[in-house]
Amino acid sequence: MTMGHSGASEFFVRLRMIENANLKPRDIVVLYAVRATPGMMGLELAKKLGYRSRSNVQDCVIRLVKHGYAVDRRVADTQQTPNDLHCTPAGELLLSDIVPK
């Protein structure tokens, strides 16, 4: 299947939007999964995405929280493992702009 000029242009525009948000494409996949299942733990998230351990998604979660696209509502601040992840309104807006309709 080949992508026409307009399809390729749209794809590159979406990649630029991800880059402008200081994120990586993998971060968008993680954010999409967090939005689909609010309150998910880091290990559950990793398993849902097919990763062997939560450390594979931990950098993504840190980046998403840092930039305000996700929030970790864990009870204990001393706990290092993300365990109550939610998409923020900024994350919802970003996904609505990036994810094709």
Image: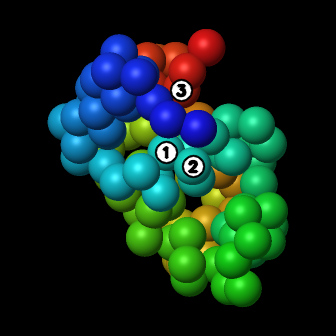
> How far apart are the two marked residues, 1 and 2, measured between alpha carbons?
4 Å
- In the figure, residue 44 lies in which quadrant? bottom right
- In the figure, residue 98 lies in which quadrant? top left
Residue located 43% across and 70% down the image: 59
Along the horizontal axis of the image, is 14 left or right of 44?
A: left
Q: Quadrant of the N terminus?
A: top right
Along the horizontal axis of the image, is 7 left or right of 86?
A: left
- Asked if disc 3 and disc 1 are in contact, CB closer than 8 Å, the reply is yes
Q: Which residue is mark 2?
A: 29
Q: Residue furthest left?
A: 20
- Asked if disc 1 and disc 2 are in contact, CB closer than 8 Å, the reply is yes
Residue 74 visible in the shown view = yes
Q: Is residue 73 above or below residue 76?
A: above
- Residue 27 place in picture, x, y as percent: 46, 53
Nearer mark to the viewer, of 3 and 1 = 3
- Residue 78 place in picture, x, y as percent: 53, 76
Q: Secondary structure at mark 1?
A: helix
At label 2, which amino acid type do we have?
Val
- Asked if disc 2 and disc 3 are in contact, CB closer than 8 Å, the reply is no
Q: Secondary structure at mark 3?
A: loop
> How far apart are the two marked residues, 3 and 1, measured between alpha carbons?
9 Å
Q: Which residue is mark 1?
A: 28
Residue located 35% across and 15% down the image: 6
Disc on the earlier residue, 3 or 1? 1
Exactly how many numbered labels are in the figure?
Answer: 3
Mark 3 burial class by Cα count in 10 Å: few <14, some 14-19, many 20+ = few
Mark 1 burial class by Cα count in 10 Å: few <14, some 14-19, many 20+ = many
At label 3, which amino acid type do we have?
Val
Q: Which residue is mark 3?
A: 99
At label 1, which amino acid type do we have?
Ile
Residue located 72% across and 85% down the image: 52
Q: Is residue 84 above or below residue 56?
A: above
